[in-house]
Image (tube, coloured by chain):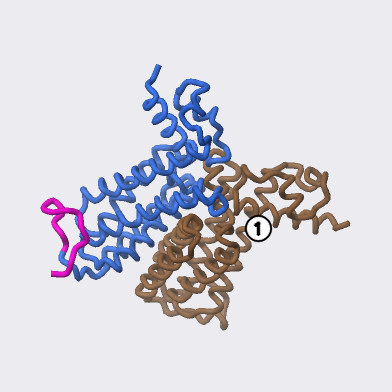
Chain colours: A blue, B brown
Amino acid sequence: MPRRSDSRAKMIEAAAELFRQRGYHATAFSDVIQASGAPRGSTYFHFPGGKQELASEAIALAGDEIEQMVAAAAARCDGPGSFVRALGDMVAARLEGSGYRSGCAIATMVLELAPQNEDLSGEFEKVFGRWCEALAREFAVRGITPGRAAELADLVMSVFEGALVVSRAARRIDSFTTATETLAELVEREPRPVTPVDRAAGPTTHAMPP
Amino acid sequence: MPRRSDSRAKMIEAAAELFRQRGYHATAFSDVIQASGAPRGSTYFHFPGGKQELASEAIALAGDEIEQMVAAAAARCDGPGSFVRALGDMVAARLEGSGYRSGCAIATMVLELAPQNEDLSGEFEKVFGRWCEALAREFAVRGITPGRAAELADLVMSVFEGALVVSRAARRIDSFTTATETLAELVEREPRPVTPVDRAAGPTTHAMPP
């Protein structure tokens, strides 16, 4: 019998994937039990707050995953354009690998539940905020001013979110690739007045003018 | 008693709004009856194909609305950047006016149903295709080469789709405005090697080099 923490974590992972693929309303606790292999009857022991508590945990998990993805993309590129391209490649690989089922981890729930569900809307907003900050930080350490880095972060986040919607409908990666590659080229042309920071040598703070 | 066509059209409009705000799964025929004021018991008379037929009609209606919105934005701007800005203003006004409930007409359904529901996925794809073509045509008549116009159309469509997701979560327009304004500036800087077409003077065809 799995330990409590194992069982709970597996249920959160399974729920996150189901919410992502078909949404909150079409996912029942019984689906989560089946997909996670958790013992039947354990749902309200692990999640006394019910499905909404499970959703909160899945949203927080999505925030962690996105930050990890941004860090992984940042580790294998140099300029801001190649950073966008690297991130796009990772997101595209996941979408294609899932047969166009796994798009953004929270977007399906956002469109079903925001703004009506105020608690979850606040959590969605926090995750998008975390994503935006992570992106802005990467642009800033690559020579773009902090203010412009924040604007580009908003743009980049929207492009990825939207391209995932369009490509799920098309069941082809073409539109995603065109949108992210066009974006990468535009970002590559951005003026970079700030001295890029050597991230290997120092903490990941915003670059400051010399 | 309303005529058949009135009743049917009102049900399609009501369903489109409900699908948009909360999605396919959370919308029952009884909700559509209530929102449209259609006579109870008329659902399978008007929609023998059930909820999926209602969804098909709502998707087609979304395609019409988007083309009308693109045409309205095109009528009140000159360059490609101001076109993006005009379209953004219209979409933002609708989102704000609805209390952040009305985002893209089909995105919620796309994320719930694609790619699992093959018939509706094909219809989503057609609508995005219509939107993309309408956008590309407007860029092309504003001096951008047809190939580049198609790339920008993919990018612009993704930005709007994604910014609508993010702004619904935030229940503020800031992120939408930043993303679309940043995009408008980038599009404004695009090289325009093709002689712009005077749309008032001729048919809305792709501009050709002189």
Position of residue A141 in the picture relative to residue A34 (left or right) = left
**Residue at far top of view:** A1
> Is any atom of residue A170 visible in this view?
no
Relative image position of residue A14 (x, y in whole percent):
44, 32
Q: In which quarter of the image is the N terminus of chain A?
A: top left
> Is any atom of residue A29 visible in this view?
yes
- Give the tally of numbered discs: 1
- Is residue B105 part of the magenta span, yes or no? no
Please tell me whether residue A75 is drawn above or below residue A154 in the rendered image.
above
Q: Identify the amino acid type marked 1.
A: Leu
Relative image position of residue A79 (x, y in whole percent):
21, 59
**Front in this rendered view, residue A199 or A41:** A41
Q: Main secondary structure of the magenta part?
A: loop
Relative image position of residue B148 (x, y in whole percent):
39, 66
Position of residue B18 in the picture relative to residue A57 (left or right) = right
Please tell me whether residue A78 is drawn above or below residue B93 in the rendered image.
above
**Front in this rendered view, residue A118 or B70:** A118
The answer for which chain carries disc 1 is: B
Q: How crowded is mark 1: few (under 14 residues within 10 Å), some or many (20 or more)?
A: some
Q: Which residue is drawn at 53% across and 29% down?
A: A31
Q: Residue at x 45, y 55 (%)?
A: A162
Magenta-tinted stretch:
A196-210
**Residue at numbered disc 1:** B61
Position of residue B52 in the picture relative to residue B180 (left or right) = right
Q: What element carries label 1?
A: helix
**Front in this rendered view, residue A139 or B141:** A139
**Residue at far left of view:** A201
- Is residue A197 part of the magenta span, yes or no? yes
Q: Residue at x 48, y 32 (%)?
A: A47
